[in-house]
Amino acid sequence: MSNWRIRLREHITNGISRSVSLSSTSIGERFGKDSTQVTTAITLTLLLRPVGALVGGILSDMYNRKWVLATIMVVVGALSLATGYCDTFSAFLGVRALFGVFMGGVWGPAASLSLENLPREARGLFSGIFQQGYACGYLVASCVNLGLVPSVSLSGGANYRALFFLGAGLSWLAAAIQAAVPVSRVHNSKSKSNSETKTKSKLFQHLCTILRTYYPNILLAIWLMILFAFFSHASQDLLLTMYVQSKCFSNFRATQLVIVANTGSVVGGVVGGIMSQKLGRRLTVVVCSCIAGAFIPLWVVPSSFNGVAAGGFFVQIGVQSAWAVVPIYMNELSPPNVRALFGGLAYNLGLMVASGSSQIESRAGETRMIETCGRVHEDYATVSGIFVGIIAALLIITALLAWENKGRDLNGGGHDDGQAERYVVDKVDAVDGQMTPKSSGSGVKTKVGDPEEN
């Protein structure tokens, strides 16, 4: 369980990485940029995350995940600290781009290590709790933005830098604890197996064989993560800006609303995780997406604090309860022995495709004006509501048509992983001319992407 707590702490740090979203207005004032230009930093971060996911996933699956993760968290902390000391907008964008590369290497290894040691009946709940480490980080950052940022005095009036300094400290804390805790028994056995495979064949051939064998699962995972990434970013990226400009709340009151919404996220993660263990991964996504869609009007129409707070709370319950299934769903869809690479790359490719979400919303909001509080403002609320509704509908359709492997053995010892692994290794060996593929009647090679209930 100590390993699991570390993975959660690393994901909380991931949530705190959303500091740019929380402080977009202050950053814009600091560098003389508008909201759309500031969101370029978010876009760059997301665009480059698959690079880190690819490198970090391969290194974590082939070698020692413990030290790979610890190293990544040290660098993430350094880049978070450097963000606070950027004096030009170009330097700010450059540091955030590098930050995105290294953040991309965190999710896959952390998610696989968190869940592969757990009993099957606990996977759904802990998947939801793990994923909401992200929401917890965002919640912590929101509280700091509300309480600490206005009270500190930093040079140049750039008090928002306190958020990035906090992110640096928590990243280094996670790295230190990561380095002190031993790697799980399951990963120790897997890394030895992967090292043996590495000596028999070239890494590229091994990955190509996995791609040919598991392409239905790979395509499904990437498409799902694209939709999930748009789901969360459409409902969160411009949340503070929406409350300030479209609803006319002060920055203080708007941050309070963000805290309420993220409290809903945390609650949703637990609820969604429990639901997925009872209803299955796909049906949970369907139900929770319906919940998010149903509360969109309450989120975007009211102008009162209580009305907007209630709408944001329940929309985030729906969004994040659907997200609760993502870590375990990706692990159960993954080919054996490449779970960090598979989950991390699918997750971050989805984020990359959705990287323009905040800019799309920002531009769309600027083209739709609304008069509130005696002034004309961008209508970010309506745009965000429409965007979230469209993505919720696409998620419902995809989940109904998809498949799942709920209860699959993640230890590499079950009949599904064992057969699949033998087939992949035999195919790779055949490419190298070391042996001929075994002709087992398992049928795994033709039905890897089919539904599999264990």
Image (tube, rainbow, N blue to C red):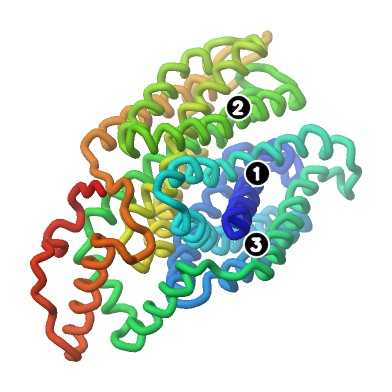
Does residue 20 appear in the picture of this structure? yes
Within 10 angstroms of label 2, few (less than 14), some, or many (20 or more) residues? many
Query: Which numbered dot is residue 261?
Result: 2
Which residue is located at x 12 percent, y 78 percent?
438
Could you classify mark 3 by the number of other residues whose Cα lies within 10 Å: few (under 14), some (14-19), or many (20 or more)?
A: many
Q: Residue beneath label 1, please? A: 137
Q: At which x and y percent is residue 351?
A: 45, 49
Q: For the residues carrying marks 3 and 1, which lies nearer the camera in this image? A: 1
Q: Amino acid at mark 3?
A: Val
Q: Quadrant of the N terminus?
A: bottom right
Report the amino acid beneath label 2: Ala
* Mark closer to the chain start, 1 or 2: 1
- How busy is the neighbourhood of tag 1: few (under 14 within 10 Å), some, or many (20 plus)? many
- Residue toward you, 372 or 128: 128
Do the residues under discs 3 and 1 have CB atoms within 8 angstroms? Answer: no
Dot 3 or dot 2: first in sequence order is 3
In the image, taking residue 40 as reference, residue 166 lies left or right, namely right
Q: Mark 3 = which residue?
A: 76
User: Could you tell me which secondary element the residue under label 2 belongs to?
Assistant: helix
Q: Point out the residue furthest to the bottom here.
A: 434
Q: Who is closer to the viewer here, 57 or 393? A: 57
Q: In the drawing, does residue 319 fall left or right of residue 278?
A: right
For residue 150, above or below residue 310: below
- Residue 432 rendering spot, x and y as whole percentages: 21, 88
Element type at mark 3? helix
Tell me if 432 is positioned left or right of 57 in this view: left
In the picture, the disc for residue 152 is none
Q: Quadrant of residue 373?
A: top right
Q: How many marks?
A: 3
Q: Residue at x 13, y 79 (%)?
A: 437
